[in-house]
Image (tube, rainbow, N blue to C red):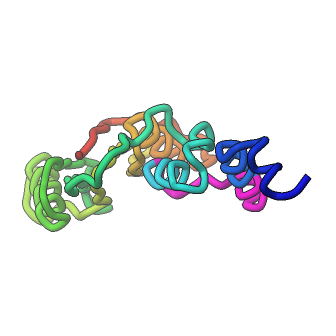
Amino acid sequence: MCGGDAMARIGWVGVLMLVALVAGASLGGRAARAQGSADCYARCNDSLNQGMCRGMCDTAEPTPQGPPRTPVYGAIATTKAEFKMEYGTASGFSSQDAASAAAVANCDKRAGGKGRCEMDIWFYNQCAALAVGNDGHSSSHYAGSRIGAERSAMRSCQDGKKRTCKVVTSFCAG
């Protein structure tokens, strides 16, 4: 059977599935594992993968598909080490600087004075969570979903230690 006959028999969808399978195998089965869930879903939905690796992403909630969205920024700020643990959040801003400044201001207000807080993380068109341990250790993470961000923050907060952590806030921007 020549190439053309084989192509007609399995069709383009079959070829795309085969290419996606080979690409996934060549990456050690981790084609979709990316730093954040949004990146994971973006990679899964590219022209090569055709959404076939969605199950490998860290979250149960995929990033919505469609035209690129305008960035909507959010941020989490936490108190500096010498102060009692507090945090501030910001969401819905059109720039990283504005979201960061609002989160620090919110944290300073909660902590009882200006200059007590510093930026922890900023993100856009994603969700974030902050987990705090019983010893005051904290960890902030962002992901393509609230669930993904909470899981990552908890995992990082516990970090193999015998520390009890809990998510104190989680929210989305965009």
Viewer-proximal residue, 4 or 106? 4
Task: Name the residue at 17% across, 49% down.
Answer: 90
The residue furthest right is 1
Viewer-proximal residue, 6 or 163? 6
Q: Is residue 96 magenta?
A: no
Magenta range: 22-37
Position of residue 87 in the picture relative to residue 39 (left or right): left
Task: Name the residue at 31% across, 38% down.
Answer: 170
Q: Is residue 18 above or below residue 61?
A: below
Tell me, yes or no, if residue 132 can be seen here.
no
Residue 65 in picture, x, y percent from top left: 37, 43
Viewer-proximal residue, 172 or 164? 172
Q: For residue 105, what is the image quadrant?
A: bottom left
Q: Is residue 5 above or below residue 145?
A: below
Tell me, yes or no, if residue 169 can be seen here.
yes
Q: Is residue 29 magenta?
A: yes
Residue 31 in picture, x, y percent from top left: 65, 55
Viewer-proximal residue, 29 or 163? 29
Residue 136 in picture, x, y percent from top left: 39, 47
Task: Name the residue at 24% across, 55% down.
Answer: 75
Provide the major secondary structure of the magenta segment.
loop
Position of residue 32 in the picture relative to residue 131 (left or right): right
Residue 87 in picture, x, y percent from top left: 23, 48
